[in-house]
Structure formats: structure tokens, C-alpha cells
Image: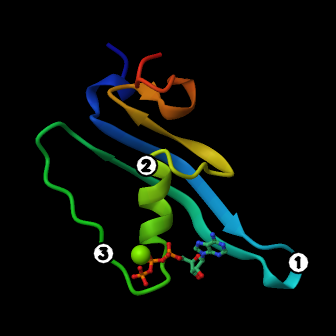
Amino acid sequence: MTQSEKYFLEIKDLKKSFGTGEARQDVLRGVVFHVQKGEFCVLLGPSGSGKSTLLNIIGGIDTPDSGYVAINGDKLEDMDGGGRR
Ligand SMILES: Nc1ncnc2c1ncn2[C@@H]1O[C@H](COP(=O)(O)OP(=O)(O)OP(=O)(O)O)[C@@H](O)[C@H]1O
Ligand SMILES: [Mg+2]
């Protein structure tokens, strides 16, 4: 079992920006955290801080510019539609 496989949810160096040039907004700037199975986790932050952006990426609705989300050690980007590798 690798280090990452013991986490139910692992978020590593997640980055996401919207817009270009002057309008560019760096919303997620290298988010790192992990949640173990059974652990209780709360996502808090002011409006516009990127909570929905983060949840959309965790849920697979949106994709990050860089970094990854892994569930039980499997990166979302490597999964097919059924959640398998
Ligand atoms: N699809 C998008 N295109 C451009 N900008 C976006 C997009 N989605 C989010 N943003 C911007 O990213 C920032 C974070 O938005 P997000 O909706 O993730 O915040 P939030 O923490 O969920 O806010 P709230 O508490 O109001 O729901 C905001 O400045 C928002 O305008
Ligand atoms: Mg929101």
C-alpha cells in the first residue's frame, strides 16, 4: 500500500484559474489536503474563495489546471466513467 492509498481523498497541489490577461483570476493556488476514511471534513471560506470550484473538481464536473484529486489512491484523471481505473 502506497502512502496515497491510505487516504480516502487526497488533494495535491491543485491549481485552477479563470480568465486571461488582466481578468485572470488564480482561484486555487496549490491546494493540498487529505481526508481519511470516516474523517469529518468541513469546507469553509468567504464568498468567492473557491469552495464551489474545489468541489466541482473533486466531483469531476470541472478539471484542474494542474495537480490532482485521488480517491482511495486512484487519480480521478485515470478513472473511466464508472470510477474504475
Ligand atoms: N466558470 C467560471 N468562470 C469564471 N470565473 C469563475 C468561474 N467559476 C468561478 N469563478 C470565479 O472564481 C472565484 C471562486 O468562485 P467559487 O464559486 O468557487 O467561490 P465560492 O467559495 O463557492 O463562493 P460562494 O460562497 O459565493 O458560493 C470567484 O471569483 C468566481 O467569480
Ligand atoms: Mg459556492
Sequence-wise, the earlier of marks 3 and 2 is: 3
Q: In which quarter of the image is the N terminus?
A: top left
In percent of the image, x 50 and y 83: which residue is there?
48
Sequence-wise, the earlier of marks 1 and 3 is: 1
In percent of the image, x 33 and y 23: which residue is there?
5
User: Could you tell me how far apart the alpha carbons at marks 1 and 3 are, in whole angstroms?
Assistant: 29 Å
Choose top left, top right, bottom left or bottom right for residue 70. top left
User: Could you tell me how far apart the alpha carbons at marks 1 and 2 are, in whole angstroms?
Assistant: 27 Å
In percent of the image, x 14 and y 47: which residue is there?
39
Q: Is residue 45 left or right of residue 23?
A: left
* Three-letter residue code for mark 3: Leu
Crowd band around label 2 with a 10 angstrom C-alpha radius: few (<14), some (14–19), many (20+): many
Which mark, residue 21?
1
SS type, badge 1: helix
* Three-letter residue code for mark 1: Gly
Are the two marked residues, 1 and 3, in contact with CB atoms closer than 8 angstroms? no
Q: To which residue does mark 2 refer?
A: 58
Q: To which residue does mark 3 refer?
A: 44
The spot of residue 83 in percent (x, y) is 40, 25
In percent of the image, x 57 and y 31: which residue is there?
77
Q: Is residue 41 left or right of residue 27?
A: left
